[in-house]
Amino acid sequence: MPAEVWSGAVRPWVVLSNQVLLDHRWLKVREQRVRLSNGAVIDQFHLLDSPNWSAVLAVTPENQVVMVEQYRHGLGRTSRELPAGVIEPDESPLEAARRELLEETGFFSERWHVLLEVSPEPNRSSHRAFVFVALDARPVQTPKPDQSEVLRTLLLPAEALLDDVDRGVLDHGIHVAAILMAERRGWLKCPRATR
């Protein structure tokens, strides 16, 4: 039996009051009082503003994917991820992706494609994530990560990366989505027999 569908328009909430609780470089927390389109009022809705960020799914000519491992305090453990970082105010998302790939891994590419632009958590956070594919990536320098980053660079065969997704080894939801989208678009060459 199909679910009942409401045909009315979904309208934006009305902000009745807005107070900044925390304002730092990487995070602003706002407490708002809002009225929903059905008239209900939420007295304390917390909205998070953080910088937009870019990530890179870099693939070498040998069909290996350039990954990083780093400690993530929210998880309380090491996480395997795509190279990624905050977009600086004077950068485009692609410029940030190029910079992050070079800084975090020492890899460079001249073949870039847009993969995804998404809202990682649209209910409470206003930031956007931009993910690119960099093909024919090659090492050109020693990694030079930020002082706040302790990273280990890994090269994983595309098949192994997809196996890691299947086994739940990768936790970062946007990175998992990017990997699966890249495979779907043919940028990761993975024999179906191993899947």
Image (cartoon, rainbow, N blue to C red):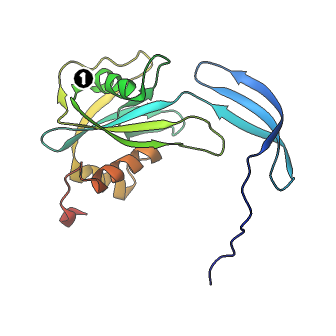
User: Which quadrant, please, contains the C terminus?
Assistant: bottom left
Q: Position of residue 139 (x, y in %)?
A: 18, 26
186 relative to 94, above or below: below
Q: Is residue 88 above or below residue 15?
A: above
> Mark 1 Cα within 10 Å, few/some/many (few <14, many 20+)?
some
Residue 120 image position (x, y, % from top left): 53, 43
Q: Nearer the viewer, residue 13 or 23?
A: 13
Above or below residue 134? Residue 11 is below
Q: Is residue 63 left or right of residue 185?
A: left
* Residue drawn at x 41%, y 39% as measured from the top left: 79
Between 96 and 190, the one nearer to me in the picture: 96
Q: Is residue 117 left or right of residue 27?
A: left
* Residue closest to the eye, 81 or 38: 38
| Residue located beneath label 1 in the image | 106
Q: Residue at x 51, y 30 (%)?
A: 52
User: Which quadrant: the N terminus?
Assistant: bottom right
- Residue drawn where x is 54% and y is 36% of the image: 74
State the residue lying farthest toward the bottom.
1
Q: Residue at x 41, y 15 (%)?
A: 147
Closer to us: 101 or 71: 101
Q: Is residue 27 visible?
A: yes
Percent position of residue 169, x then y: 37, 50
Relative to 21, 156 lies left or right: left
Looking at the picture, which amino acid does disc 1 mark? Gly
- Disc 1 on helix, strand or loop? loop
In the image, residue 53 above or below residue 40: above
